[in-house]
Image (cartoon, rainbow, N blue to C red):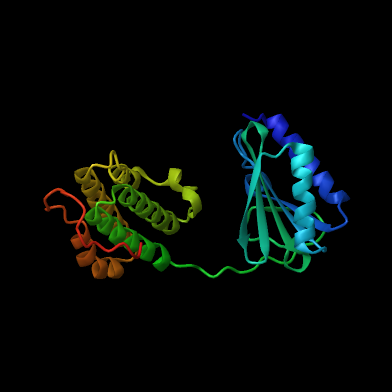
Amino acid sequence: MFSVEERDRIQRRLLRLAEQDPGVVAAAITGSHATNDEDRWSDIDLAFGVSDPLDSVLRRWTQQMYQDLAAVHHWDLTAGSAIYRVFLLPHCLEVDLSFSPEGEFGPRGPRWRLMFGRSTPPRARASSGHDGAAGLAWHHALHARISIERGRFWQAEHWISAMRTQTIALACQRLGHTTSYAKGAHLLPSDITGPLETTLVRSTDEAELRRALSAAVTALTAELTRTDPTLADRLHPVLTELAAIDRPPWTGRAPHSDDGGC
């Protein structure tokens, strides 16, 4: 694994390269390093504002990452006009570099430390509310049940786990913690995380999947009751039906089961 010294040395080197690149007009440290919350396992997160076309800057930096830092692989994630190019370096070091047109270069959250150049003012972010996470949760519960009925047990495991993720997101949002990638999950109290442990799928046996789905529905219902009692009341009959486990074990694929949809 990478060392702290190696990581910090590479971060300083990347910032120097950015200052020397005529196409990069601004740079910021983002993520945990921006607020001095990094630990031994934190990766590198940098944001660049660019005046050149994004394609040419991305091509130049990608070539440099492979030639100079021996990058192993990379992939892209887009957010608005920004492109996040995520690199894996030797010794398991992740480097996330975001590139934005200079007119749209600015903080997307509190973890932002401008290193040089100028950035646009922080944009007010409209609250996403809880309907999105609640909607995904019932969607995942529905498709977990359907997957079990179809005998697609690995797919059922996928949906049950995804449902738990949305329940965690609802709890984190309600308590003011980070919702993405379960980053705030470790801050949740035990009366929330305890029941969630029972939703972990221990095998792809049908009876176990039905048990885990029932536990996941119970945990979701409890969180919805805390978050939005009115919505919890509306969803309760449907969620209860999805969690019903009083059914004989699966004996084989239904001869005319539908292969479409999720």
The residue depicted at 79 percent of the width and 45 percent of the height is 64
Check the picture and name the quadrant holding the N terminus: top right
> If the image is split into quadrants, where does the C terminus sit?
bottom left
Percent across and percent down for residue 96 are 66, 48
Q: Quadrant of residue 87?
A: top right
In the rendered view, tell whether residue 52 sits above or below residue 67. below
Q: Nearer the viewer, residue 157 or 242?
A: 157
- Residue 99 figure quarter: bottom right
* Left or right position of 227 against 182: left
Q: Is residue 46 visible?
A: yes
155 or 172, nearer to the observer: 155
Residue 153 drawn at (x, y percent): 28, 48
What is the count of numbered marks?
A: 0
In the rendered image, residue 111, in percent from the top left (x then y), is placed at 64, 53
Horizontal relation, residue 179 to residue 151: left or right:
right
Query: What residue occupies the far front of the structure in this picture?
Result: 255
Residue 178 shows up from this direction: no
Residue 36 vs 253, above or below: the answer is above
Residue beneath the point at 74% across and 41% down: 66
The answer to whether 81 is drawn above or below residue 85 in the figure is below
Image position, residue 139 (x, y; %):
34, 63
Name above or below for residue 89 compared with residue 170: above
Residue drawn at x 22%, y 60% is 242
